[in-house]
Amino acid sequence: MATSSDLEAARIARLPDTAYYIPDFVTLEEEINSVPLPRWTQLSHRRLQTWPSTLTKTNTLLAASLPAWLHESIVSPRLDTLGCFAGSPHQTPNHVLINEYRPGQGIMPHEDGSAYYPLVATVSLGAPIVLDLYEKGPDNDEKVNRNPAFRILQEPRSLLITTNELYTQYLHGIAERLTDEDLGVDSIANWEMLGDTQPYRNSSYERQTRVSLTYRDVLKVAKVGNSVKFLATGR
Ligand SMILES: O=C(O)CCC(=O)C(=O)O
């Protein structure tokens, strides 16, 4: 199992501070067994599951454990062994978003914001996808350029960690297209770190359904039991 000393070896050297990429983070068998339970919310451009629940309007997580199949089984213990959440308030992820993208679907460039400790650990399942990184504009939210500053190819079963300046100073998004093209050592920041470049030997691939599990640590957590008790006693 990859440990914290392996994390430095997984650093994507061609990106600003800091991203890590680990191919084959989960095995084929684990990938097949990790099909999410059907609790999807249909959004206009993708489907989403939020575990254990959506954040409140004040970006607070109502305290609840992540289900065992997300937290205890495979990914969280490996993230803990890597030590990537060692500096976060809860020292382990407490929130997971699961996104499903069919061919042609994507997610607009955005930032994940201050509700979370500035680190996202993303496990990709099912099919590859290209994540685009954009520099923030002067007003801190618009894209500076229409073109991405960097592109990361996420293979199925891989782990991508984004943190520090890359989390705070860049937007990330997935283009709505059927084919990802112009794939090669010059255009893909983690090309040398891919487990297998053969599927991209024609510099492109056709999108298939891809599922991402994004592990995060929500900074503010409220104990629901206490507020319910408070309401009940009126004190
Ligand atoms: O699916 C992904 O890899 C990106 C998901 C994402 O950007 C998000 O949930 O905020």
Image: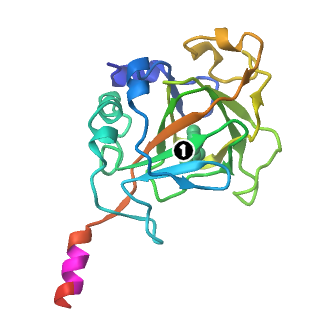
| Residue 156 in which image quadrant | top right
Q: Is residue 227 shown in magenta?
A: yes
How many residues crowd around disc 1 within 10 Å: few (fewer than 14), some, or many (20 or more)?
Answer: many
Q: Which of 65/28 is in front?
A: 28
Left or right relative to 193: residue 144: right
Query: Which element type, helix, strand or loop, lies under badge 1?
Result: strand
Q: Which of 51/78 is in front?
A: 51
Percent position of residue 109, x then y: 69, 48
Question: Total number of numbered labels?
Answer: 1
Please give the name of the residue rendered at 50% of the width and 19% of the height, measured from the top-left corner: 23
Q: Does mark 1's beta carbon lie closer than 8 Å to ligand 1? A: yes
Percent position of residue 94, x then y: 34, 50
| Residues in magenta, as a range | 226-231
Give the vertical position of 37 relative to 131 (above or below).
below
Please give the name of the residue rendered at 40% of the width and 44% of the height, measured from the top-left corner: 37
For disc 1, the marked residue is: 99
Q: Is residue 77 shown in magenta?
A: no
Please give the name of the residue rendered at 67% of the width and 55% of the height, measured from the top-left corner: 44
Q: Which of 86/28 is in front?
A: 28
Q: In which quadrant of the rendered image does the N terminus lie?
A: top left
